[in-house]
Image (cartoon, rainbow, N blue to C red):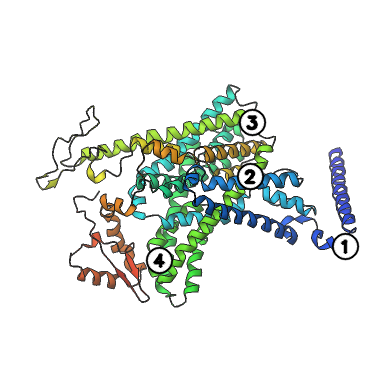
């Protein structure tokens, strides 16, 4: 009874407190009738107040315009852009604006991932808090899908799948390695008393390790594109970062569930937890990939059956919906929306665009690039604005931040270098297992000498070994060299995905603010240290730059080596999802004077569409059956 009386007393006091504030607020408004429209917002959700919404978007859009203008200034000065990446500049603008908002308007403190704060009528205060907070819901459900879709839409499928094995190794096994390395290092530092009195549970450290292992090398990739680096390096970094985000999110959700449910002392980390984690990840990743593949095929089949080329606007609207529909459907099924939308972009570009009119296809490409760039810029602007709360907050333990940063660097190294050696060893083993293959003999000059020459022996072709890569010529674009591995380690920047996960960190023990501040510090350090030094690292490591991607594919006969995919497509997929495929394919095949085989044709990438049908142009891949890997 005493407790009930105390609760009733506290509730009455709280109600009296809010009533007093509301009455004071109303009495202040009565002093000036002209301010009635400005402050006529009642209690409740901030987003129900039109005045607050208008102020928020006026300020945010003004900052966005400023960032775009400064980006033009940065692009016109390549030397400055090589030192200060566009993402870093955007964060700086957001941080400066956030500082002025913070000092000019009193705010109660950072909202740790909650968007539905109680609105008490002070419009300016809640506009400031809205600007200085980072909404995970807005990030995951509005800004992220167009970025990931565009990543899959613009990539060259042949190059991506050519390097799918190392990409998968780094993204899946590497992320798991990094997660456990970070957690183990921080657990050791905690037991030694080196974390400044901050002592989270091991499962919290494992959850933190999963989110901080999600890389976001936007700054690095921007420099890669500007410098036109070696395509192998670009697609390794790009592919690993996209799949790595998906793996990190799955691991984060799994660890969060385990941490929130049950008694932490009864958790068997080394026993039943590992199989459960692996099973959940496998189901989520494979299911999401198949869902993305299915979404691409369904969209292509629908556009084949329903010819919308006579109504370009409706055709464009329908195709644009592909960006969000599979993402939300995957989330509804408790799968990974990131993986789904990535593969939707890959296969929609491969199949669905062949059924679009030429004008819509060109418009769609520009539209997706526009949406992705605007969303990406908004994310980094939000990061800069919210960084003010991260560093003025009392919930930051600098000793723990230092150890977490060290753990990230070590975890990244133990991810890249052992897996790189494993992958190169697999290539060498496959070469030696080839019928008629030579044996590599290494000398002091680091050259390779095959025991047999590249001669046709008994009807087979012996692969020629490259003096540079020490692998067969047909695989010379696969081996990961030392400088490529160093650049892969250097490209392990952290970004918005890690910070958004930190904002939703399980707060059972009240440690979320500490992990949010730690994540923000690591994001800022990696973006401004590694991101700004990317150009310097490329020159120091002597990475090939200004490479022609098409020439690279031609020299390495990439399309010819991926013909096994084209065989499957031409037989089981293209006739069913691409309009007039069989007629145009066989017409083209019959008129081809070089008698190019079906295996060497690429009817998708080389499709030139007219308003009535498609004409497929086949190219001689330059390779033969003996050169296909």
Q: How many neighbours does mark 4 have within 10 angstroms: few (below 14), some (14-19), or many (20 or more)?
A: many
Report the disc number at residue 33.
1
Distance from label 2 to label 4 (Cα)?
Answer: 41 Å
Distance from label 3 to label 2 (Cα)?
Answer: 21 Å
Distance from label 1 to label 2 (Cα)?
Answer: 36 Å
Report the disc number at residue 95.
2
Q: Earlier in the sequence, mark 1 or mark 2?
A: 1
Image point (27%, 38%), residue name: 469
450 is higher (above) or lower (below) than 107:
above
Element at label 2: helix
Image point (24%, 70%), residue name: 588
540 is higher (above) or lower (below) than 72:
above
Residue under label 4:
353
In this view, the residue in front, 179 or 217, is 217
Quadrant position of the N terminus in the picture: top right
Residue 446 % position (x, y): 25, 31
Residue under label 3:
397
Q: How many neighbours does mark 2 have within 10 angstroms: few (below 14), some (14-19), or many (20 or more)?
A: many
In this view, the residue in front, 37 or 399, is 37
Element at label 4: helix
Distance from label 3 to label 1 (Cα)?
Answer: 48 Å
Does residue 333 appear anywhere in the picture? Answer: no
Circles 3, 2 touching at the beta carbon (< 8 Å): no
Circle 1 or circle 4, nearest the eye: 1
Distance from label 1 to label 4 (Cα)?
Answer: 58 Å
193 is higher (above) or lower (below) than 161:
above
Element at label 3: loop
Q: Earlier in the sequence, mark 3 or mark 4?
A: 4
Image point (28%, 39%), residue name: 427
């Amino acid at each position: 009874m005493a407790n009930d009386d105390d609760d009733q007393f506290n509730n009455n006091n709280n109600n009296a407190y809010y009533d007093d504030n509301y009455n004071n607020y109303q009495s202040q408004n009565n002093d000036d009738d002209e301010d009635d429209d400005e402050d006529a917002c009642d209690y409740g959700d901030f987003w129900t107040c039109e005045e607050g919404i208008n102020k928020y978007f006026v300020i945010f859009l003004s900052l966005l315009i400023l960032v775009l203008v400064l980006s033009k200034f940065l692009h016109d000065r390549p030397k400055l852009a090589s030192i200060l990446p566009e993402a870093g500049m955007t964060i700086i603008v957001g941080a400066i604006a956030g500082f002025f908002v913070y000092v000019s308007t009193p705010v109660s403190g950072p909202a740790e991932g909650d968007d539905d704060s109680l609105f008490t009528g002070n419009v300016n205060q809640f506009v400031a808090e809205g600007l200085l907070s980072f909404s995970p819901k807005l990030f995951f459900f509005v800004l992220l899908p167009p970025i990931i879709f565009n990543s899959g839409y613009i990539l060259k499928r042949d190059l991506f799948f050519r390097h799918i094995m190392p990409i998968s190794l780094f993204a899946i096994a590497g992320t798991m390695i990094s997660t456990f390395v970070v957690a183990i290092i921080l657990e050791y530092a905690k037991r030694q008393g080196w974390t400044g009195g901050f002592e989270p549970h091991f499962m919290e450290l494992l959850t933190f390790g999963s989110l901080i292992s999600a890389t976001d090398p936007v700054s690095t990739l921007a420099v890669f594109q500007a410098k036109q680096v070696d395509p192998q390096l670009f697609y390794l970094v790009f592919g690993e970062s996209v799949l790595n985000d998906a793996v990190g999110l799955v691991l984060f959700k799994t660890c969060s569930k385990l941490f929130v449910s049950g008694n932490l002392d009864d958790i068997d980390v080394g026993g039943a937890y590992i199989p459960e984690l692996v099973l959940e990840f496998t189901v989520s990743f494979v299911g999401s990939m198949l869902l993305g593949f299915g979404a691409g095929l369904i969209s292509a089949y629908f556009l084949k059956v329903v010819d919308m080329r006579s109504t370009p606007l409706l055709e464009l609207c329908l195709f644009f919906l592909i960006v969000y529909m599979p993402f939300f459907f995957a989330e509804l099924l408790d799968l990974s929306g990131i993986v789904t939308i990535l593969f939707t972009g890959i296969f929609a570009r491969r199949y669905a665009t062949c059924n679009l009119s030429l004008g819509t296809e060109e418009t769609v490409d520009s539209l997706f690039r526009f949406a992705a760039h605007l969303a990406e810029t908004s994310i980094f602007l939000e990061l800069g604005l919210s960084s003010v709360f991260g560093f003025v907050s009392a919930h930051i333990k600098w000793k723990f931040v230092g150890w977490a940063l060290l753990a990230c660097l070590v975890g990244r190294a133990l991810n890249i270098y052992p897996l790189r050696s494993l992958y190169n060893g697999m290539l060498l083993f496959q070469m030696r297992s080839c019928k008629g293959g030579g044996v590599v003999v290494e000398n002091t000059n680091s050259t390779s000498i095959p025991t047999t020459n590249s001669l046709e022996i008994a009807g087979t072709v012996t692969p020629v070994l490259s003096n540079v890569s020490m692998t067969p010529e047909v695989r010379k674009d696969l081996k990961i060299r030392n400088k490529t591995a160093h650049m892969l380690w250097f490209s392990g920047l952290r970004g918005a995905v890690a910070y958004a996960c930190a904002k939703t960190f399980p707060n059972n023990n009240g440690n979320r603010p500490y992990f949010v501040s730690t994540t923000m510090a690591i994001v800022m350090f990696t973006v401004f240290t590694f991101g700004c030094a990317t150009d310097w690292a490329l020159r120091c490591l002597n990475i090939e730059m200004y490479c022609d991607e098409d020439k690279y594919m031609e020299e390495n006969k990439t399309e010819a080596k991926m013909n096994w995919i084209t065989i499957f497509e031409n037989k089981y997929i293209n006739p069913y999802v691409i309009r007039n495929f069989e007629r145009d394919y066989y017409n083209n095949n019959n008129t081809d004077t070089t008698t190019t085989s079906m295996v060497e044709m690429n009817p998708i990438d080389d499709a030139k569409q007219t308003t009535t049908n498609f004409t497929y142009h086949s190219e001689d891949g330059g390779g033969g059956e003996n050169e296909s890997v």
